[in-house]
Image (cartoon, rainbow, N blue to C red):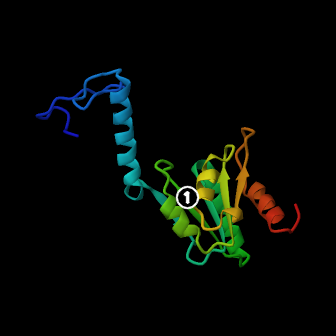
């Protein structure tokens, strides 16, 4: 896209537009444009993705999280590491396009993958689809308006591992 004030003229609006940048409501034109843009973005997922990772080199218990929930997951990872448990965190900082290859790569050797999020499991579904072992991907969430805590995550982890609540 040209710089503002440069040699090219273009419109910036929330409207759908044609290939010249002018508003249109023609369904075929809008459909083509939207698919073109989505395909273009998804093709660059690996370049667009932003993330942080902690202790994933040898992690057997991998947490995938984002936003405020990632802070609680990271706290638990440090606690577990202090107890000799090989835990790691993949903190996603961009969610779309979903970095499926990154998730697949970083969770490949994990015994369990815990997706920690503050909703009904929207990202967990994406992680499960990307993972090598989708049956070992578990949701750890809260949907009551309270922040998820390291203790909340640990309780779910203990249940999944058969160590009680």
Q: Nearer the viewer, residue 164 or 98?
A: 98
Number of numbered discs: 1
Residue lying farthest to the left in this orientation: 7
Tell me if residue 74 can be seen. yes
**Depicted 41 relative to depicted 133: above or below:** above
Residue that mark 1 sits on? 91
Please state the horizontal and vertical placement of residue 87, each as a whole percent of the image: 66, 71
Q: Is residue 36 left or right of residue 147?
A: left
Residue lying farthest to the right in this orientation: 164
Q: Nearer the viewer, residue 130 or 68?
A: 130
Q: Quadrant of the C terminus?
A: bottom right
Q: Nearer the viewer, residue 147 or 30?
A: 30
Please state the horizontal and vertical placement of residue 148, each as a whole percent of the image: 71, 49
Q: Residues within 10 Å of mark 1 (few under 14, many from 20)?
A: many
Q: Nearer the viewer, residue 104 or 18?
A: 18
Splitting the image into 4 quarters, where does residue 77 fall? bottom right
Please state the horizontal and vertical placement of residue 109, each as a whole percent of the image: 61, 75
Q: Quadrant of the N terminus?
A: top left
Splitting the image into 4 quarters, where does residue 44 fall? bottom left
Please state the horizontal and vertical placement of residue 33, each as a whole percent of the image: 34, 35
Tell me if residue 52 can be seen. no
**Depicted 16 relative to depicted 58: above or below:** above
| Residue at point 31%, 22% (across, down) | 24
| Residue at point 43%, 55% (across, down) | 49
| Residue at point 48%, 47% (across, down) | 96
**Depicted 81 relative to depicted 45: above or below:** below
Q: Is residue 8 left or right of residue 54?
A: left
Disc 1, SS? strand
| Residue at point 50%, 52% (across, down) | 98
């Amino acid at each position: 896209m040209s710089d503002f004030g440069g040699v090219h003229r273009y419109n910036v609006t929330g409207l759908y537009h044609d290939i010249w940048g002018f508003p249109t409501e023609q369904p075929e034109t809008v459909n083509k444009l939207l698919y073109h843009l989505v395909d273009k973005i998804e093709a660059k997922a690996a370049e667009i993705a932003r993330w942080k990772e902690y202790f994933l080199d040898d992690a057997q218990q991998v947490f995938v999280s984002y936003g405020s929930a990632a802070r609680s997951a990271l706290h638990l990872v440090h606690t577990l590491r202090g107890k000799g448990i090989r835990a790691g965190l993949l903190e996603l900082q961009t969610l779309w396009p979903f970095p499926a290859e990154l998730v697949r790569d970083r969770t490949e050797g994990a015994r369990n993958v815990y997706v920690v999020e503050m909703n009904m499991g929207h990202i967990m579904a994406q992680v499960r689809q990307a993972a090598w072992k989708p049956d070992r991907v578990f949701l750890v969430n809260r949907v009551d308006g309270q922040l998820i805590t390291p203790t909340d995550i640990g309780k779910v982890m203990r249940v999944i591992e058969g160590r009680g609540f």
